[in-house]
Every structure is written in structure tokens, then in C-alpha cells.
Amino acid sequence: MIHSDDRILTTHTGSLPRAADLLAKLPERQRGIPYDTAELQHAVEDIVRKQAALGIDIVTDGEMSKPNFLTYIDERLSGLERERRAADSDVPNPWTETKDAANFPDYYSGGVGVPPLPLRMICVAPLGYKGQQLLQVDIANLKEAMKKVGIKEAFLPSISISNVADFQLNKYYKTEEEHLFALADAMREEYKAIIDAGLLLQVDDPNLVTHFMMKKDATVSETRKWAELRVEALNHALRGLPEDRIRFHTCYSINIGPRVFDMELKDIVDIMLKIRAGAYSFEFGNPRHEHEWRVWKDVKLPDDKILIPGVISNSTVVVEHPEVVADRILRFADVVGRERVIAGSDCGFATNAGSKEFAPSIVWAKLKALGDGASIASKKLWS
């Protein structure tokens, strides 16, 4: 992947507001009816052009084809069937059982904007990958948009083993470990195909740092043990793939909330760095984590690795001032070196298609602040 050799490069996490025509057809898409090929291709080109105009160097397709950053995988894996419930309203909201919810019940009682969860998938047979055609459409659309807009590098997000395993119900494999490694073998096909196509693979793994807060009674030591197995399974899926073509992203899942029980970076960073990736993307723009740049003073970042700290955040609708963005970038450049910093975002701004938490105009303003802030930081670092 390209480095910030002569200026600070910019990127983000992936999900962006979907095009209006795609949103109108979202109910059909969620029933397995694909988008019109030409409409989807046009939407991807538009979102790539938009990113470039706002100063984003390393772009993606905005996940235009995906109803959700996680559940898109349901139709790409074999060995699954849909969970049956009397009504969608019977699907439990996991956020009501979190550490944050236990301590801020008056805030979480209203649902805090968490969209209704889809029915889960149940693993009832050996897992396999059957999403080749859907994936190739995503790859082709992004590469064609890159060519038309003149973009040199782009990434395609793909969900992690851990997130799929925790969302699915396993009724086939005898153990949790067996299930995880079967998922790893299946997901490897998607991971490898993205890299083979000449794109960067971004593994999306909110679960790595979210698990601690989601489990009301989980301790840090228990969470670390839980994470070790999942990192082992992810590395199994990534075995032999070029690390310098892989970005790993983790975040705290909920957008706007108290976030008091987010796992601290210092308690998980060593496990994160075991992941076979060339770059690590994590939350930093969120005020709950802005002090954590100091962690990298004590942690030895391998010489061939890059950091992608979030310098704009999904935890607030406040649009960051470009000078604030620049200051955040400068902190990391001072600790690990300017060439090993790419400015990113804390998380996606539309991880569920049609999300109402962020008006598109705010997302575009935040991305512009990201680009402008990186320009300010670059002038200071290369003057």
C-alpha cells in the first residue's frame, strides 16, 4: 500500500450514505433481489468521485451494494438458513445488555437510534463461500470507477471472522473453535479475491474492541483470552496473503453514546498487532479515546506497519475543525513518523443503509475537514 511519502494521505473506514435510488430499492435488496447493474455502477462511480473531490486519497465503493456492513455476508456463505421468529420485533436488541446500558438506563431505554436487527442466520451445514459473483461485481465497479476518476489506490471492506461468528447461531459445528476456523476457511476466498484483484483488503472487526462493553460481566483478562482465539482464526484466513495489501479496522460499534465502558487501547493493542496486516485503523477522533496516541510511545510498532488513526469521528455530528484534524495527525507523526501515518475516520457513517444518524451533508463536511486537516499537517511536516 502507498505510504505518506511526501504528504499525509487520507482515507476513511468504508460505509458512506447510499444513493437515493439504491435506498428506494433496499427492501428488495434485503430479500435477495440484486440492484440493477447500471444503477449500482453509476452509484459507485458517483461516490468515488465525491471522495476524490473532498480530498480523500485512498477511496472505496462506500459499500453501495451492501444493506449492512455485516449482514451482507449472509448471502455469500453456504451452510446457513434464516432464523425463524414470530415477528421481527422478537429479535433482541443487544445494546440493552451492555455495560453502558446498565449504567445509563435512561439513555438506552429509547433505543438510541439503533436500527432494527435483521433475523440472524443459523449454521446448519458445512460452511462454504458462494458469493463469487456478487464480489466480482463489487470489484469490477470499484476498479472501473477508479479508472474514470483517476484514483491510484482503493480498498474494499470485508467482514471479520469474529463478527460473523458472534452474529450467527451455530448448530452444526461441535465447538466454538471449529466454527471459527470453518468461517476462516470460507472467508479466505473473499479476502484473497480482493487482493488478487489489485485492491487493498480491509478486514472490518468492530468486535475485537466492542466485545468487552457488550458483555455486562466480561473482564479485561477474559476479553483478551476471547480475542486471542479470534485473532488466531483471522490469521488462519489471512495466511500467505501479502500483509502490505491488508488493512485491519476495529472500532466500538455504537455511534453516539456515553461510551464509558469502551475497552482501552492499552489493554488490547498487543493482540491487535498480532494480526497479519500492514496497517491498523482504530478510533482516535472520539473524545473518549483522544488521549490514546500516548499508547504508541510505549508500544513498538513494527517497522513495516502503518497506523490509520481516526481523526474525524462518528461519535458526534459536530464537524471537526481542520486545525483540530491537523493537530491529531501531528501527534501520531511525532510518535511513529510522518511516513507511517494515514489520516482516517473512526468508523463508517452509514454502516446500515438508510441510517438516519448522520445527514449526508454532515458526512461530506467531515470528510472535507479530514482532507483540509491533512493538507495543513502536511505543510507543517514537509515545510
Image (spheres, rainbow, N blue to C red):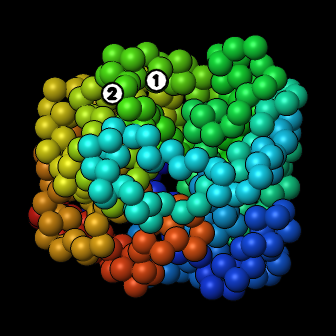
Residue drawn at the location 78% of the way across and 68% of the way down: 29
Q: Residue under circle 2?
A: 268
| Residue 328 picture quarter | bottom left
- What label sits on residue 145 in the rendered view? none
Q: Residue under circle 1?
A: 227
Quarter of the figure that contains the C terminus: bottom left
- State left or right for residue 259 relative to residue 226: left
| Residue 269 picture quarter | top left
278 or 81, which is in the foreground? Answer: 81
Dot 1: few (<14), some (14–19), or many (≥20) neighbours within 10 Å?
many
Q: Position of residue 2 (x, y in %)?
A: 44, 52
Label 1: state its secondary structure: helix
- State left or right for residue 89 relative to residue 294: right
| Residue 142 picture quarter | bottom right
Label 2: state its secondary structure: loop
**Closer to the N terminus: mark 2 or mark 1?**
1
Whether label 2 touches label 1, CB < 8 Å: yes
